Amino acid sequence: MSPFDHPPGDTTWNQRHDLLPELAQGIGALSVDMADIAGALSLVQEGVAIAEGEAEQLRQVAGAVAQTAQSLAGGAAEAERGLAAVSTSAEEARSQAELSAARAAEAAERVRDAARQGSELEAALANVARITDVIAGIARQTNLLALNATIEAARAGDAGLGFSVVAREVKELAGATRDATDQIGTSISALSRAAEGLRQSSERGAAAAQAGAEAGSATSGALDRALDSVAAVKLTVEGMASLGVRTGEGARQMEQSIARQAEASLRATQDLTAAAKRGDALQSRSEALMQKAAAGDIEIEDTPFIRAVQGGAGRIASALEAALDQGLITMEALFDESYQPVAGSQPAQVTTRFTALTDTLFPPIQEPMLQLDERVVFCAAVDRNAYLPTHNRKFSQRQRPNDPAWNMAHCRNQRIFDDRTGLRAAQNTEAFLLQAYRRSMGGGEVALMKDCSAPIRVRGRHWGGLRLAYRVA
């Protein structure tokens, strides 16, 4: 006798049998709770992993800031030393400029003295020239007197013979005087020109020396201002160096703190990973219990969905086999796995050689399934790789350009849903598969769902599965 056979008059067996639906219901609720916990753990795990990655990035940034601050402090110190050297050089240049200005002023004064002396010499030469002119005039008068004396001596005859000798001597003296006066005049002219040149050169030299003295003074003033600027920059650089040191110390402290946080996040991630694995294992066990409970002869709340999805899978298989018989498609095309991307789709959509056929055959079977219960969200067939070619009409809208968020919610056809639930439903070959999972409804809202699926076999070959998803009451 089987443990499930009903012994006549066994009230204990009747009591246990009455508890079975309640037990199966509890197992189903447990499976949903485990799916909720596993999903929550997965989300927390993802969040901690993201935080860990961001902490590591922040630590690297803090390290880079510390290095930059250290480099800044070092550069500021180097600049400070350079400014000190520039200040020393500028101070020396200022001293040299002051000395050059003083010497230029002294040279200018001496040149001015030479110019004054040249002017005095020029005046003296002018006086000598005037005296020479007077002497030349006397020589001309003497020569004229000698001429007159010669004429008178010639008139006097022998009586004027002695006078004629004197006249001749006077004439020779006048000639000699005239020659000497001419030579003196020539020399004086040359000296006058030389004195004029000396005076002009002295004046130009004095002007140049004065300009040099003024330039030296201006250079000294500019160097004074440059020294003031260098001093101001030096103060700024000193402040930068101090700030760089403080920033580097703060950045190093922050880096150490972030490193400690990263280590804590890593430990938390490891713990969460282990917890998530245990959660997945518990979810699988609870789903296995739920599957066994649903497979029994006991009527549970999931039984109508199981029967409906099995019937739908059978009708889809019959429709595909009829299409093969009519020559609408070949087995090779029906089992095509060459998924071709749809250009510009966001999120990515793909097509195969059987997509056009399923768009014709599947809606008449899938759409009525939505009326089975108000909790049903969708009913759609997927191939064994979780490719969903033809979704319900409400989820098969035309994609909007550059609006992936809207497309994600409203354009779910021609997509591959190879998550845990979707892939298990696609690859299941048992009579049915009952799963519980969390489904994102957008905007941060999450709904607890059950996914009931049944395999689709075409001419004995596993093509995929029909999925029926509904909310948990």
Image: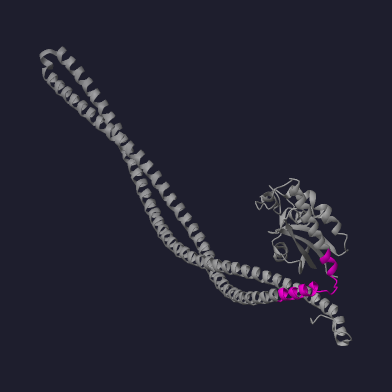
Range shown magenta? 282-307
Q: Is residue 397 visible?
A: no
Position of residue 150 measured from the top left corner of the image (x, y, whole percent): 17, 17
Position of residue 341 measured from the top left corner of the image (x, y, whole percent): 67, 50
Q: Is 71 part of what is drawn in magenta?
A: no
Nearest the eye: 179 or 418: 418
**Quarter residue 291 falls in:** bottom right
**Quarter residue 30 falls in:** bottom right
Q: How many marks?
A: 0
421 above or below 33? above
Q: Residue at x 50, y 57 (%)?
A: 225
Nearest the eye: 113 or 147: 113
Position of residue 70 measured from the top left corner of the image (x, y, whole percent): 51, 68
**Quarter residue 244 falls in:** bottom right
Q: Residue at x 11, y 15 (%)?
A: 159
> Quadrant where the C terminus lies?
bottom right
302 above or below 386? below
Position of residue 236 measured from the top left corner of the image (x, y, whole percent): 54, 64
